[in-house]
Amino acid sequence: MKRIFLVLLIVFSLAAAGCIKAEESVTIKEDGSSTMVTRMVGNMFAAEALKATKNEFVAENPDAVVKDVNDGDMTGYEVTVSYPDIETLAAKGGDMFTAVEGRNAGVTVTRSWFYDAYTFNLFAKGEETDMGAQDPESKKMVQGMLDQVQYNFTLNLPVKPETQNADSIAGDGKSLTWNLKKTISEGKDVRMQASYRIYNQAHIALTVGIIVLALLLAGGFLYMRRRKQADETA
């Protein structure tokens, strides 16, 4: 998605201010399945390029659900892709989910008897826009247009995270949003981090049940032993 967004930016940053708005959101369920929604809209100058990127996106994701959307005087599209588990999301979710040694760990899952620990260590690379040999006034104007581009990434978790570095939080602390505009307007990298645990209630209940049963058996054995000793001394 980042690559497609950069293509659009190059085409339209010189056309008009506030010409494009991009939003990506990933909603994760307790079982690890997830849904990614990519929404991109632009003004009349962006119409043809948006259409081209939509076709490219669909070609890369044949199972995606695509629909046209409107946002005020902007038009565009929304693409929804579902993943059966975290491992598939990490493998096919896009560049920001890719683990690169020495940079970010991507998405990791540590499974144990009582809980599964999920850690998101995502990375969005900053991209400098080549303005060529423009005069300072033109560069300033282009930069002003870039500053009006909107680009957000939201991670909707099934539970409140234990750690996170989101720019804004909503939904009882479960919805985390990062503003990625500075990857475009300032060429800065953005690291997104969040971690949470999903407790295995069935395993916990089974363990508690085993402990209670063991205590009852031990108590019963002790009671019978003491009763037998009392009968022998009577």
Image (cartoon, rainbow, N blue to C red):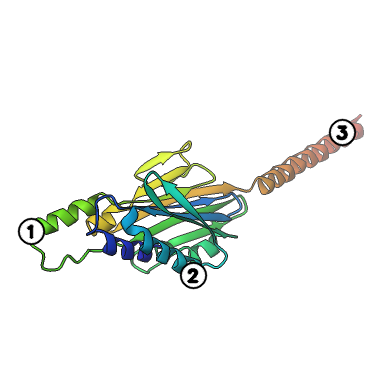
Kindly identify the residue that appears in the image at 28 percent across and 57 percent down: 183
Q: Earlier in the sequence, mark 3 or mark 1?
A: 1
Q: Residues within 10 Å of mark 1 (few under 14, many from 20)?
A: few
Element under label 1? helix
Q: Position of residue 77 (x, y in %)?
A: 45, 55
User: Residue 216, how many percent across, how many down?
Assistant: 78, 38
Query: Between disc 3 and disc 2, whose residue precedes?
Result: 2
Of all residues shown, which one is farthest toward the front?
A: 44
Between disc 2 and disc 1, whose residue precedes? 2
Residue 42: percent from the left, percent from the top? 35, 53
Query: Taking 188 as reference, is 82 left or right?
Result: right
| Residue type (three-letter) at the residue carrying disc 1 | Pro
Residue at figure coordinates x 29%, y 52% from the top left: 149
Nearer to me, 216 or 72: 72
Question: Residue 221, how many percent across, how many down?
Answer: 82, 40
Amino acid carrying mark 3 in the image: Arg
Query: Which residue is label 1 attached to?
Result: 136
Position of the C terminus, as image quadrant, is top right
Residue 51, label in figure: none
Q: Callout 3: 10 Å neighbours few (<14), some, many (20+)? A: few
Q: Secondary structure at mark 3?
A: helix
Q: Amino acid at mark 2?
A: Glu
Q: Nearer the viewer, mark 3 or mark 1?
A: 1
Q: CA distance from mark 2 to mark 1?
A: 39 Å
Q: CA distance from mark 3 to mark 2?
A: 75 Å
Which residue is disc 2 drawn over?
60
Q: Nearer the viewer, mark 3 or mark 2?
A: 2
**C-alpha gap between disc 3 and disc 1:** 97 Å
Residue where numbered disc 3 is placed: 227
Judging depth in this view, the residue of 224 and 68 nearest the camera is 68
The structure residue drawn at horizontal position 34% and vertical position 58%, both measured from the top left corner, is: 46
